[in-house]
Image (cartoon, rainbow, N blue to C red):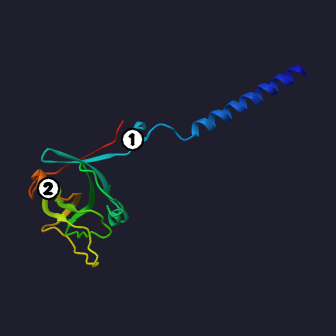
Amino acid sequence: MRNRRLILILLLSAALLVLAAAAWKVRPSSAPASSIPNTHPQTTAHIRGRTFSLEVAATPSSREIGLSETDSLPVDRGMLFLYDTPDYYQFWMKGMKFPLDILFIRDSTIVTIARNVPPPSDTGDLPLYAPDEPANKVLEINAGLCDKYGIREGDTVEITSSTPR
C-alpha cells in the first residue's frame, strides 16, 4: 500500500511538472521585439548606392491597400509592388497621409518616376499615375529621395530577398 501511494505521488508530481513546463513555454515572451529573431523574408532594393528595406505587396489585396494605412515611412524604407507581366499599371494616392516618389520598373530598370506625388486633396480628386512604358514592379519611397539621391529613369534597381538566420 505504501508503494502504491508513493507511485501515485510521483505520477502526480510528474504530471504537475509537465503542465507547469507547458504553461511556461506558451507564456508570452517578455523579451523586446528587437531581440526576437526575424524569420520573415527580408527584401531590399539597391539603387545608386542606397539601400531600401521593403515591404512587398504581391497579392491583389496588399496592392490595393499599399501604404494607405501607414502614417509615415522611415527614409530607408519603401513598398514594392510585384506583377507577373509588364503593363501600364496605374497608381493613386487614396488614403495616403504623406507624399511619395513612385518608381515604375521593368525587370531591373527604372522606366518612369512620378516625383513628389502629394497625398489626396480635400476635393476628393484622385489623379492616376502610370508609367510611360510597361512595368512589372513599382517601388514607392518617400517624396524627394529620387532628387536627393540622383535616382533617374534608366537606373538599375537590384532587388534582393533573403531569410534571416
Task: Say which of marks 1 and 2 sits in front.
Answer: 2
- Which residue appears at 12% of the width and 47% of the height? 48
Q: Which residue is mark 1?
A: 38
Label 2 packing within 10 angstroms: few (<14), some (14-19), many (20+)? many
The x and y percentages for residue 141 are 22, 56
Quadrant position of the C terminus in the picture: top left
Residue 22, by quadrant, is: top right
The x and y percentages for residue 147 are 11, 56
- Which residue appears at 39% of the width and 41% of the height? 38
The label on residue 146 is 2
Instruction: Establish if 76 lies above or below 7.
Output: below
**Mark 1 and mark 2: span between their CA atoms?**
29 Å
Label 1 packing within 10 angstroms: few (<14), some (14-19), many (20+)? few
Tell me the SS state at disc 2. helix
Q: Name the foreground residue: 62 vs 51.
A: 51
Q: Name the foreground residue: 127 vs 7.
A: 127
The x and y percentages for residue 80 are 26, 56
Instruction: Establish if 132 lies above or below 138.
Output: below
User: Who comes first in sequence, dot 1 or dot 2?
Assistant: 1
- Which residue appears at 32% of the width and 61% of the height? 67
Instruction: Establish if 76 lies above or below 64.
Output: above
Tell me the SS state at disc 1. loop
